[in-house]
Amino acid sequence: MQGRFKRDGSASAEPEPQHGGTGPKAVSSSPQHAQNPGQDRPSDSGDGTGRPGQGTAAPASGQQPPVKPAKGSTGPGPRIALRNWRISTRLVSLLALPVVAATSLGAMRISQSVEDIQQLDNMKLLTEMTKQATELAHALQEERDQSAGPLAHGSSSGAIAVKGDREKTDRARKNFLDSSEAIDAASKDGNLVGVRDSLVGLAGDLNDLERIRSTAYQAEDNSTQTVEAYHRLITHLLDLSQDMAEATSNPEMIQRTRTLAAFSSAKEYASIQRAVLAAALPASNTGKPDLAENDRLYAESALQSQKSEIRSFTSIYGDGAEELLKPISEGNPVIESSDAYAGRALAKQGALGGLDKRSYQDWLDDSSTKIQQMKNIELKLLEDMEQQARELRSESEREAIISGVVILLVLGVSLVGAFVVARSMIRSLRRLEDTATRVAQDRLPELVKQLSETDPQDVDTSVESVGVHSRDEIGRVAAAFDDVHREAVRLAAEQALLRGNVNAMFTNLSRRSQGLIQRQLSLISELESREADPDQLSSLFKLDHLATRMRRNGENLLVLAGEEPGRRWTRPVPLVDVLRAAASEVEQYERIELASVPTTEVAGRVVNDLVHLLAELLENATSFSSPQTKVKVTGHALPDGRVLIEIHDTGIGLSPEDLAAINERLASPPTVDVSVSRRMGLFVVGRLSQRHGIRIQLRPSDSGGTTALVMLPVDVAQGGRKPQPKPGQGAGNGGPAAAQAAAGVAAARRGGGRSA
């Protein structure tokens, strides 16, 4: 170094004599003692690193105060709580009840339709059974009526015809019994139990047919006995239609079964008249008819019953009954003649003998015309019943299909609608959630970082909207979030501006303080140069060191404000000079011992900051160790060009937790806040090391106390050049030239850091 800087910042061509304020002072009086080792607090000046556990507890720098829970907050509660359900789950639950209700009602409707179909299937079976019963009843009527004449008069010529009629009846009976098996199978579900019981009784009655045949028309003057026996069987067969009416609840089918029962009964009463008169008439036209009074009364009652049943049929059938009865009521002379003949023959006792002579065959031929027409009408009614049953079943099937389709359609529309509504809500909520998360985790922290590092006017503080512009509650929440986002950005900008103003205040205060301190140091130096009394000179040295510490505190304010040093050295400075300059700024400088410092140079741009950094560490080491001990400073040049500086003290040491916390703050200096003022030295060391890539770490010392490791990178320790070690050339306390260079560095720092 060419000379040294004076305290006023001007460089002199000749080196000044070393004074007490510029380097380690050799004084006759004992130096001011540091704090006792047992005292757990930082140095009084507040510029120490403030080791944890060695001072009043204070929040760590940059650490936010604990956030109190919101009033009335009880936590989210159990996961199964309704308020913790997802929106999609709530929507599904909301729609589940009406959908389940609608599905249940639809299922009931379909079930009812299925039951109707089953009932109509049973009705179809009953209609078929009724048809078979009607056929059997007609066969019994033909057998009874056609065999009345031959059997009543013992005619052998009609035996073949009687046998043929009976064979027809047997075939009809077999068909009827075979059809009853289907009813028996269908009755297992309990719907046709009554019909099955009727069929069981009817099958037992049909077993008596052979007995009736064996005694048919054998009683003299009593054909009623045989006719009545057949009539009971036929009546039981016709009653099946009534059982069928009871087995169904369809009003149309009930009406049709009643009309069929009424007309079949009328046909049976007409057949009874035919049988009684056939048994009474002779085999030839010349014979004499023989109609017993009992038979006449029986036949006359049948005639009245026929008329009554026809009236019932007309009443039940309603419109169209007269049209349906035309074949037997008008337009047919044979039927009209036979009706007139029967009416006169049965009107009173002996009336048959006064009528024209007829054989029973003539009567059967004439009366069978009406019976055949009635049979045709009966078949027409049966066909109508079958057609109605088929139509009702088809209609029930259509209703069941339509109901099923409607239910599926309603469910589909409900599910699609629920999906669309849920998707719309969930998309908006997810967009709101994603935006809120991105803003909270990325946007705001990044914006705050930008505002803290650059001019707030150069930072884009525009707020991007969530993008949910609906008028529902979600849209209003999104709008409110946008407002909150804008307010948060505004507050962050205001906070950054306030922080910038505070930094400006720090800078102004520091500059003013430095100006005053500079004048004070100049005055002290002047007094030192004129003072010869050792005691007075020692006091001046103490004032010099106190002023130096005050100057360093002023520089700390500049570091807090993020300001760079105004002036820097343009040429490298030996490391030993930097260490001596740092030691000269420590109050207990005489306790600092330099040993084995490598012959390396520090880049000029780093000299002022490195002296400041090392001074803070040395001040801290002397403050928290016994005044009777030494603080040793050693240096090691590493093969890769880096330089490791170790500062050892024998203080009370630190716990592993405190060491970890301090090292964390040194590696990542926190944001400036109130706690920084309590541990300003720790913050300043971290900021200065971070500025130049210097690594600092504290660790326990092997001999007790704490060791501070300062790793200088290559561009700092070598000025960007490759290391050039010089074996055997080291530095301890140094010689006069080294002391003079260190004094020059210290003087330059006092003078504002102007380059040599």
Image (spheres, helix red, strand yellow):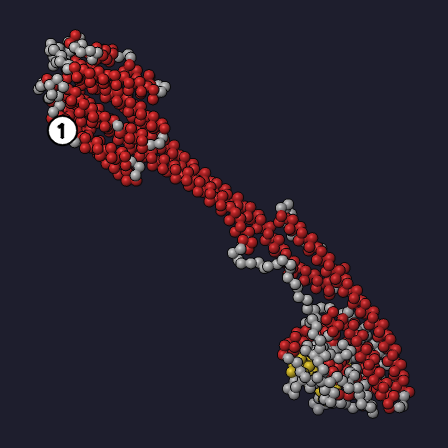
Q: Which residue is mark 1?
A: 210
Q: Nearer the viewer, residue 519 or 188?
A: 188
Q: Nearer the viewer, residue 450 or 131?
A: 131
Instruction: Say which amino acid is labelled 1.
Output: Glu
Few, some or many C-alpha atoms within 10 Å of disc 1 (few <14, some 14-19, many ≥20)?
Answer: few
Q: Toward which corner of the image does residue 72 lie, by quadrant?
A: bottom right
Q: Toward which corner of the image does residue 232 lie, by quadrant?
A: top left
Q: Is residue 37 above or below residue 442?
A: below
Residue 395: x and y in percent read 38, 32
Residue 545: x and y in percent read 82, 82
Residue 715: x and y in percent read 71, 77
Secondary structure under badge 1? helix
Tell me the quarter of the image containing the C terminus: bottom right
Query: What residue is drawn where x is 69% and y is 71%?
Result: 59
Residue 411: x and y in percent read 47, 43
Q: Is residue 58 above or below residue 454?
A: below
